[in-house]
Image (cartoon, helix red, strand yellow):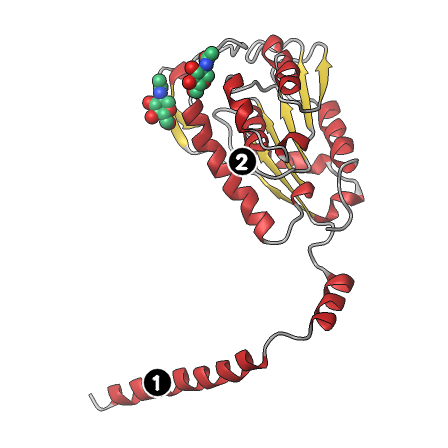
């Protein structure tokens, strides 16, 4: 029993010491602005950093898609941080309610431009993606060096996420995706978001998300006043080819900013 007060008092002493140590540091204040800006100019560790977020398709997982980054061998990608999140497990209507990794509900396969949509479910998923982007922006990454890319359901979520993000991003790349809401969303796209470039790639032999659903993308974006580069791939089904990934590499490379 005699040990206890001893332990307590040494803990108190440590706290007191920490307090006195902290006070003089705080009183010293920040360094003069000229010194500080010199430091930032010469060694901003975030300058040229980029962030690439990859959103997988229905029933897939983030880790299973990580090999995608091996296609990005250009030196410009040395400073890139990649993220391959996995969708939460949820019940999917088109799969008779089966529970699987899914960003939002899908009602029918194949997905067409007329397929029913649940906007509030998509918007919930968009909030999660925005939280991932915000984390990087808070860490000092220039939003114009942030690229969101996704396949199929992840492509639809990519589109929704970049359109509803309040800032201009580096770009959004949609592979075999679709527009997951109707044109009433256009009023919610900020002038900054409208400047985000979109790359849209779709296989012409896609029987899961019909080519026709992809083709509805560019007119929708045009209606919103946005630019979109649409690439149609003959004889490609519901998949991503090496050619598409190499094209994505050049597309991102052309948009990377070397300083923030
Ligand atoms: C649409 O999504 C919301 C939010 O996830 C959900 O509460 C609602 O039941 C869904 N509506 C339909 C018709 O499935
Ligand atoms: C578009 O979506 C909004 C929001 O979900 C809905 O209120 C509206 O009725 C839809 N319009 C059409 C034409 O489907």
Residue at (42, 22) in percent of width and height:
105
Please state, as top left, top right, bottom left or bottom right, where the N terminus lies in the image.
Answer: bottom left
Measured as percent of width and height from the top left, residue 38 is found at 76, 67
Measured as percent of width and height from the top left, residue 43 is found at 75, 63
Of circles 1 and 2, the one toward us is 1
The residues bearing labels 1 and 2 have C-alpha atoms spaced at a distance of 47 Å
Picture mark count: 2
What secondary structure is found at the residue carrying circle 2? helix
Q: Is residue 124 above or below residue 15?
A: above
Front-lying residue, 209 or 164: 164
Front-lying residue, 29 or 214: 29
The numbered disc on residue 12 is 1
For disc 2, the neighbor class at 10 Å (few under 14, some 14 to 19, many from 20) is some
Q: Is residue 100 left or right of residue 148?
A: left
In which image quadrant can residue 50 be found?
A: top right
Q: Is residue 94 above or below residue 103?
A: above
Residue at (57, 52) in percent of width and height:
138
Residue receiving disc 2: 62
Front-lying residue, 169 or 251: 169
Instruction: Tell me, yes or no, if residue 106 can be seen here.
Output: no
Q: Quadrant of ligand 1?
A: top left
In which image quadrant can residue 9 be found?
A: bottom left
Which of pointers 1 and 2 lies earlier in the amino acid sequence?
Answer: 1
Measured as percent of width and height from the top left, residue 120 is found at 41, 26
């Amino acid at each position: 029993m005699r040990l206890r007060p001893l332990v307590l008092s040494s803990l108190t002493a440590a706290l007191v010491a920490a307090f006195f140590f902290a006070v003089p540091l705080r009183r010293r204040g920040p360094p003069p602005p000229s010194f500080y800006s010199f430091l930032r100019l010469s060694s901003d560790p975030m300058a040229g950093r980029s962030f690439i977020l990859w959103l997988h398709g229905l029933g897939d997982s983030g880790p299973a898609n990580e090999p995608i980054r091996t296609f990005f061998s250009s030196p410009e990608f040395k400073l890139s941080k990649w993220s391959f999140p996995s969708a939460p497990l949820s019940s999917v209507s088109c799969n008779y309610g089966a529970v699987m990794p899914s960003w939002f509900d899908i009602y029918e396969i194949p997905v067409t431009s007329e397929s029913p949509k649940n906007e509030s479910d998509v918007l919930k998923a968009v909030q999660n993606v925005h939280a991932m982007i915000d984390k990087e922006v808070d860490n000092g990454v220039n939003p114009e060096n942030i690229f969101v890319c996704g396949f199929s359901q992840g492509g639809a979520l990519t589109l929704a996420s970049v359109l509803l993000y309040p800032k201009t991003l580096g770009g959004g790349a949609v592979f075999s995706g679709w527009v997951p809401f109707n044109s009433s969303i256009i009023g919610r796209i900020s002038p900054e978001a409208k400047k985000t470039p979109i790359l849209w790639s779709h296989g012409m032999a896609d029987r899961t998300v019909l080519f026709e659903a992809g083709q509805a993308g560019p007119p929708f974006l045009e209606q919103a006043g946005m630019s979109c580069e649409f690439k149609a791939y003959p004889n490609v089904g519901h998949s991503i080819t090496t050619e598409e990934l190499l094209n994505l590499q050049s597309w991102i490379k052309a948009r990377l900013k070397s300083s923030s």
